């Protein structure tokens, strides 16, 4: 079917929740994609930071197909080797001593788990009345009724009333504001180290370390939402490892399955047994197939040479963008292969559409950023092709 035919049927049968880009994708290889009409693209979006090994990675495809043939799913009523292996790898390489993992199926679900964990941690220790969680303004934590409320942007707090109570929002980077809001009714602080959907906005390292200190003083759990920043995206397995902090809880999803849906809550030793038998569950969570995928992803990504390449390729893209002397680019920021290009407010969608026309997929973020989240395996050659298109689209000389 052509794009036009597919689009007609989509409009007929699929809920209109997405303003999709005008393209139907058909296949991929490395960081390249082809649409149903055969047009080629360089992918700087990775299915929103998911396809960290690009398309058609032989080891990933083999791990998934072999596990699917052997044992696809058994539920959490039984133990499987791939699930135990994923948990063990995450605990050991996060460095969170005594850590334990709960498996979910998405980022929002991982955050729901972390929110439940924080509230129960506090309830077990202090009883009722200490259930509020502080998040940051402009954050993004998911689309469930609870994680929408955890998201610190008013535009997400509409239509679906009543939302889950017990969230307050502090100004990102403003320690005094957080201190003011961290009253006796608070049990946790939840942050993204780089606000992804909010605009690729990295938090200041000193601020983050002060937030950690405040959490220790008041026995608040520090939850770091690494759904977008985790699994090598910023050039370390987890972004928090570059911030010099030790979170109590880390959530992850997007890149972890290399394209299959998996989310995880990783809790450090001080709170790793809070969610005891019967308190939390998921039918699909941690299935052997998605964990086989995660193990194949981690085997590649969790490697100092691989991670160094993520950092150097990110630096290469940022330097080349900065060198494009054009008034269209007002700033370039990010870490590793999570990159934000500041443009005139409201124009980000237009730039992404023009890049698409010229064969490069990218994303928007916040109200004034073009966001790049290419596969971590993207080659310099593929990067150069994308940069050439961006140079054209941003009107650089
Ligand atoms: C994408 C994202 C989520 C939500 O993940 P889903 O898998 O879409 O539920 C939560 N937090 C952050 C930081 C994200 O980037």
Image (spheres, helix red, strand yellow):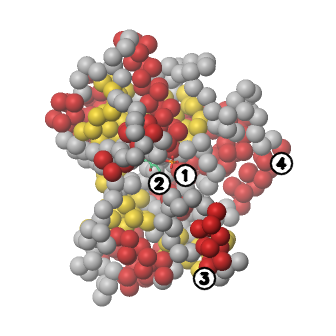
Which residue, given by chain and number where applicable, does mark 1 sit on?
255
Residue 127 visible within the image: yes
Mark 1 is surrounded, within 10 Å at the Cα level, by few (under 14), some (14 to 19) or many (20 or more) other residues, namely many
Which residue, given by chain and number where applicable, does mark 4 sit on?
69
Residue lying at the far right of the rendered structure: 70
Reading the chain from its start, which is encountered first: label 2 or label 1?
2
Which residue shows up at 40% across the image and 39% down it? 161
Q: Nearer the viewer, mark 2 or mark 3?
A: 3
Which residue, given by chain and number where applicable, does mark 2 sit on?
233
Q: Nearer the viewer, mark 4 or mark 2?
A: 4
Reading the chain from its start, which is encountered first: label 4 or label 1?
4
Indicate the quadrant where residue 280 lies. top right
Reading the chain from its start, which is encountered first: label 3 or label 4?
3
Q: Quadrant of the C terminus?
A: bottom left
Of 322 and 178, nearer the camera is 178
Residue lying at the far bottom of the rendered structure: 397
Residue 374 visible within the image: no
Of 101 and 349, nearer the camera is 349
Mark 4 is surrounded, within 10 Å at the Cα level, by few (under 14), some (14 to 19) or many (20 or more) other residues, namely few
């Amino acid at each position: 079917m052509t794009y036009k035919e597919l689009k007609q049927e989509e409009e007929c049968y699929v809920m209109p929740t997405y303003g999709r880009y005008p393209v139907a994708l058909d296949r991929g290889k490395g960081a390249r994609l082809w649409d149903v009409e055969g047009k080629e693209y360089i992918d700087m979006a990775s299915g929103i930071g998911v396809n960290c090994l690009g398309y058609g990675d032989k080891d990933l495809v083999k791990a998934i197909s072999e596990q699917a043939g052997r044992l696809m799913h058994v539920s959490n009523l039984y133990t499987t080797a791939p699930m135990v292996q994923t948990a063990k790898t995450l605990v050991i390489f996060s460095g969170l001593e005594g850590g334990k993992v709960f498996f979910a199926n998405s980022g929002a679900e991982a955050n729901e788990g972390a929110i439940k964990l924080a509230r129960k941690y506090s309830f077990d220790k202090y009883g009722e009345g200490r259930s509020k969680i502080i998040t940051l303004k402009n954050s993004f934590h998911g689309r469930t009724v609870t994680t929408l409320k955890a998201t610190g942007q008013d535009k997400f707090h509409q239509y679906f009333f009543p939302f889950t109570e017990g969230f307050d929002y502090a100004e990102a980077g403003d320690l005094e504001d957080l201190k003011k809001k961290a009253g006796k009714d608070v049990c946790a602080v939840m942050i993204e180290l780089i606000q992804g959907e909010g605009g690729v906005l990295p938090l200041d390292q000193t601020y983050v370390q002060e937030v950690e200190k405040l959490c220790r003083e008041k026995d608040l759990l520090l939850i770091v939402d690494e759904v977008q920043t985790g699994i090598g995206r910023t050039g370390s397995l987890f972004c928090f490892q570059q911030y010099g902090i030790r979170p109590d809880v880390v959530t992850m999803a997007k890149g972890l399955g290399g394209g299959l849906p998996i989310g995880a809550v990783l809790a450090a030793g001080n709170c790793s047994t809070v969610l005891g038998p019967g308190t939390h569950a998921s039918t699909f969570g941690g299935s052997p197939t998605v964990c086989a995928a995660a193990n194949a992803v981690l085997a590649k990504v969790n490697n100092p040479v691989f991670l160094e390449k993520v950092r150097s390729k990110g630096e290469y893209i940022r330097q080349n963008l900065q060198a494009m002397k054009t008034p269209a680019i007002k700033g370039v920021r990010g870490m590793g292969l999570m990159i934000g290009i500041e443009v005139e407010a409201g124009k980000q969608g237009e730039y992404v559409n023009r890049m698409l026309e010229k064969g490069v997929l990218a994303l928007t973020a916040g109200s004034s950023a073009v966001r790049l989240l290419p596969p971590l395996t993207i080659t310099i050659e593929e990067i150069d092709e994308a940069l050439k298109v961006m140079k054209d689209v941003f009107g650089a000389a």
